[in-house]
Image (spheres, rainbow, N blue to C red):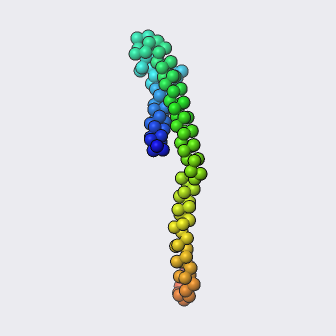
Amino acid sequence: METLVTVIHIVVAAFLILVVLVQAGNAGGVGAAFGSGNSSGVFGATGANKFLSNMTYAAAALFMTTSLVLTVMQGKTGKTGLQEKLEAASKAAAPAAAEAVPAAAAPAAPAAPAAEAVPAK
């Protein structure tokens, strides 16, 4: 169920971006191609502005709804994705740290003698 809502959320986000980009601004913009500035366009004289505005409101409402649904679905488990990853990483690091302790207790190899410095010319 969560995967389905996530897919819908992503599709709605992409659609919302496209609808906002197509809308006509003060100078016409890309929305002029769909009839926002002329009366012989696909939607009439002001039809494209009203239609695209309504599509923006609908897409924004659906985007907010899917955002809230995803938040509630994540909140029911009490754990977020980051928290689960941190717990898994700490569990994986615990055995590695236990194995590293005996290796650290072993005596270290003697240090190599320092190389002599070359005099500057």
**Image quadrant containing the C terminus:** bottom right
Q: In the image, what residue occupies the spot 57% across and 47% down?
A: 76
Q: Position of residue 84 (x, y in %)?
A: 54, 57
The correct choice, above or below, for 27 with respect to 21 in the image is above
The correct choice, above or below, for 40 with respect to 63 in the image is above
Q: In the image, what residue occupies the spot 53% across and 58% down?
A: 85
Q: In the image, what residue occupies the spot 46% across and 26% down?
A: 22
User: Can residue 29 be seen from the camera position used here?
Assistant: no
Q: Hey, which residue is sitting farthest top in the picture?
A: 39
Q: Quadrant of residue 90?
A: bottom right
Q: Nearer the viewer, residue 78 or 31?
A: 78
The correct choice, above or below, for 33 with respect to 87 in the image is above
Q: In the image, what residue occupies the spot 52% across and 22% down?
A: 53
User: Can residue 19 be seen from the camera position used here?
Assistant: yes
Q: Nearer the viewer, residue 33 or 61?
A: 61
State the count of labels. Answer: 0
Q: Position of residue 27 (x, y in %)?
A: 51, 21
On the picture, is 113 further left or further right than 30?
Answer: right
Q: Position of residue 92 (x, y in %)?
A: 51, 67
Q: Nearer the viewer, residue 110 or 7?
A: 7
Q: Position of residue 49 (x, y in %)?
A: 49, 19
